[in-house]
């Protein structure tokens, strides 16, 4: 796939099925993450791969988090929480690891972690896979943070759902760049 074509035509894929990246294809995602701009080479991120039974186990944690926040949650919300991570064969939690550094402010490290997630999704698409980055309330839920080993100032920036895209009829609009660009 041509790099410019990849950049101009990437979309989030909400419907994903098996297979997900494995072996060298998965390693390529991590290697792409390591190539993003990273002032100080701090690697201010880590990744938690959730697949197989791990999706169901974390779904149970999401259900517990939902009930901790809303004990009266209806059956539909409970079912959604329980099966949330089954929307794709693999989910990668992207966790920021901001460090105190005299030359690299926290916001720059957060941007680097976000870029790492984007690079991973682009590497997935370049290899014929698809993905969608979702965040939501579970990214900040204490029970989910604990289950994924996230503590202190670290944050779950989002969940990168990965797999093989199921074609949809949804078309992503292309905005006119003039509404977003100015010249100085």
Image (tube, grey):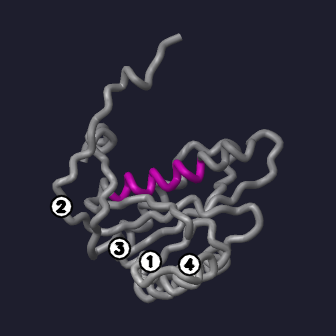
**Residue identified by numbered label 3:** 87
Query: Dot 4 lies on which element?
Result: helix
Q: Which mark is residue 167?
A: 2
**Residue identified by numbered label 1:** 77
How much space separates mark 1 and mark 3, taking CA atoms? 15 Å
How much space separates mark 1 and mark 2, taking CA atoms? 27 Å
Q: Position of residue 172 (x, y in %)?
A: 27, 44
Q: Which mark is residue 55?
A: none
Q: Earlier in the sequence, mark 4 or mark 3?
A: 4
Tell whether 8 sits left or right of 149: left
Tell whether 180 sits left or right of 4: right
Q: Residues within 10 Å of mark 3 (few under 14, many from 20)?
A: some
Q: Earlier in the sequence, mark 1 or mark 2?
A: 1
Indicate which label's residue lies in the foreground, 1 or 2: 1
Q: Quadrant of residue 120?
A: bottom left
Q: Position of residue 19 (x, y in %)?
A: 28, 75
Indicate which label's residue lies in the foreground, 4 or 2: 4
Q: Position of residue 119 (x, y in %)?
A: 45, 51
| Discs 1, 2 touching: Cβ within 8 Å | no
Q: Residues within 10 Å of mark 4 (few under 14, many from 20)?
A: many
**Residue identified by numbered label 4:** 66
How much space separates mark 4 and mark 1, taking CA atoms? 8 Å
Tell whether 45 sits left or right of 168: right
Above or below, 65 against 139 in this view is: below
Q: Which residues are magenta?
A: 112-124
């Amino acid at each position: 796939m041509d790099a410019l074509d990849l950049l101009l035509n990437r979309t989030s894929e909400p419907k994903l099925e098996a297979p997900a990246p494995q072996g060298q294809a998965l390693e390529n995602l991590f290697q792409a993450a390591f190539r993003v701009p990273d002032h100080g080479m701090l690697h201010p991120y880590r990744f938690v791969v959730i697949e197989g039974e791990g999706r169901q186990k974390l779904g149970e944690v999401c259900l517990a988090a939902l009930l901790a926040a809303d004990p009266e949650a209806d059956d539909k919300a409970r079912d959604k929480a329980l099966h949330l991570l089954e929307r794709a064969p693999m989910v990668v939690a992207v966790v920021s690891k901001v460090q105190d550094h005299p030359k690299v402010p926290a916001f720059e490290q957060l941007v680097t972690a976000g870029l790492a997630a984007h690079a991973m999704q682009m590497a997935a698409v370049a290899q014929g896979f698809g993905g969608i980055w979702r965040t939501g309330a579970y990214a900040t839920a204490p029970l989910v943070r604990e289950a994924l080993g996230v503590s202190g100032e670290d944050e779950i920036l989002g969940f990168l759902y990965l797999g093989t895209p199921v074609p949809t009829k949804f078309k992503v609009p292309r905005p006119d760049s003039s509404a977003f660009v100015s010249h100085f």
